[in-house]
Image: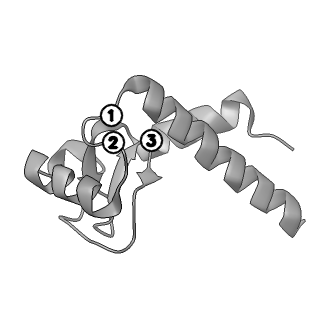
Amino acid sequence: MNLGTGGSTLIKSHEGFSLKFYGDPAGYPTVGWGHLITRTKTYTKNTSGNPNTSLLTQAEANALSSSLNLGYTSPISQAKAKTFFAEDTAEAVAAAVTQT
């Protein structure tokens, strides 16, 4: 089982995209195409579907990155976003396979 181009396109269109850290609908810090950074902290909740309405400030992003020892901060590169997406979707596909 794999995600395929159609699945990838669907996820990307639903998630939206931001190279900057933002709060998801629950307020969890997120980046790229819905890559969850952590569930240990919350920020402004995204209620619009547009990541730009809930961006973390640079100071918040830097503090979060430092506190979690992420090795990156906001904004991330396009390449990093693609890597996160590939890793996240591979995990989801693997989990779906084990549940079937």
The answer to whether residue 22 is left or right of residue 58 is: right
Label 1 or label 3, whichever lies nearer to me, is 1
State the mark number for residue 76.
1
**What is the distance, in whole Å, between disc 1 and disc 2 at their CAs?**
7 Å
Residue sitting at the far bottom: 40
Q: Residue at x 36, y 27 (%)?
A: 77
Asked which secondary structure carries label 3, the reply is loop
**What is the distance, in whole Å, between disc 1 and disc 3 at their CAs?**
12 Å
Q: How crowded is the residue under tag 1: few (<14 C-alpha within 10 Å), some, or many (20+)?
A: some
Under mark 2, the amino acid is Tyr
The answer to whether residue 84 is left or right of residue 20 is: right
State the mark number for residue 33.
3
Q: Residue at x 17, y 57 (%)?
A: 63
Under mark 3, the amino acid is Trp
Residue 41's place in the image compared with 20, above or below, is below
Q: Quadrant of residue 28?
A: bottom left
State the mark number for residue 72.
2
- Asked whether residue 82 appears in the rendered view, the answer is yes
Q: Quadrant of the C terminus?
A: bottom right
Disc nearer the start of the sequence (1/3): 3
Residue 62's place in the image compared with 43, above or below, is above
Q: Are marks 1 and 2 in contact (CB under 8 Å)?
A: yes
Position of residue 42 measured from the top left corner of the image (x, y, whole percent): 25, 71
Q: Quadrant of the N terminus?
A: top right
Under mark 1, the amino acid is Ile
Position of residue 4 measured from the top left corner of the image (x, y, whole percent): 74, 32
